[in-house]
Amino acid sequence: MVNKPIFIIGCPRSGTTLLRVILDSHPSICCGPETHILKHMKNLREKINEHWKMLKPYGIDETTVDSKVGEILTVFTDNYAKIKNKKRWAEKTPENIFYVDSINRFFPDSQFINVIRDGRDVVSSFKRRWGRKAVLSAIKYWNQSIDLNYKYKKQFQKERYIEIRYEDLVTKTEEVTRKIMDFLNEEWLPILLQHQKSEHDFWFDQSKESEIDKKSEKHPERHSPSKPVFSSSVGTWKKDLNIIEKALINLLMKDNLKKLNYL
């Protein structure tokens, strides 16, 4: 199990970046910046399949094609692991939750860690970062990702799929990280509780505010998980959302919130 690929998935703004830097702190696991490659790999594979009848004479089976398409990602992740001198890589791009079937096709031995967060706080986080116009998008993405949670939980055996709650990650960090390490068959180490003491790569220079697009982001602070774990983001919806937004949530998210025991 040691070298199996790890994919962190979850609705955007659900705490996937926090989990990313925690895993990246482990001496055996590296988790670099978001790649945003898998959706393009999925599109490429679908295009190949459209012409599969014409390609049959070339004598290549579909499993081989899947493996080769998977190399589009591993050319980056394997090299990154080599640079970091770590034996195993993880990949975190939140939208990957919508491409799990393709990931499973390209990496049939992969493991998935799904981060679930109270949908009301997800909406609050969307609003804080991108403004009020993002509220409806947040509701849509969260509902879609939660619907997929039910599917993946049935689809994968417990050795390949695990769900964690953001709220537990920030309030019971040791307990949750121990659970994750057991799932990954990796040793739990205290450094996982002090991820801010390790260096983590981002696609931009955190010291240069000029690289942050302040026009598109209402609150452009990025990657607060590079600070020690904090739980102050739990329940922010209570003060951040207005009465109309709360009514929308009650109308459109109530069923899934109830199923997940957030209500």
Image: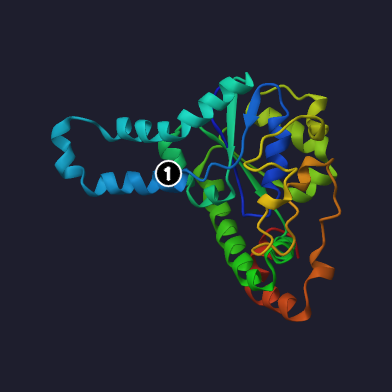
**Can you say whether 25 is above or below 242 in the image?**
above
Residue closer to the observer: 7 or 172: 7
User: Taking 236 as reference, is 48 above or below it?
Assistant: above
Asked where in the image residue 28 lies, by quadrant, the reply is top right
Q: Position of residue 10 (x, y in %)?
A: 61, 50
Residue at 67% of width from left, 77% of height from top?
A: 248
Across and down, in percent, residue 43 comes to 37, 49
Which residue, given by chain and number where applicable, does mark 1 sit on? 102
Which residue is located at x 70 percent, y 34 percent? 200
Question: The disc labelled 1 sits on which kind of residue?
Answer: Ser
Which residue lies at the image location 77% right of the left edge and 72% below the top edge? Answer: 241
Q: Residue at x 78, y 80 (%)?
A: 243
Q: Counting other residues with Cα less than 10 Å from the Cα at mark 1, is it few (<14), some (14-19), or many (20 or more)?
A: many
> Residue 208 or 116: which is nearer the viewer?
208
Secondary structure beneath label 1 = helix
Residue 112's x, y, as percent? 57, 39
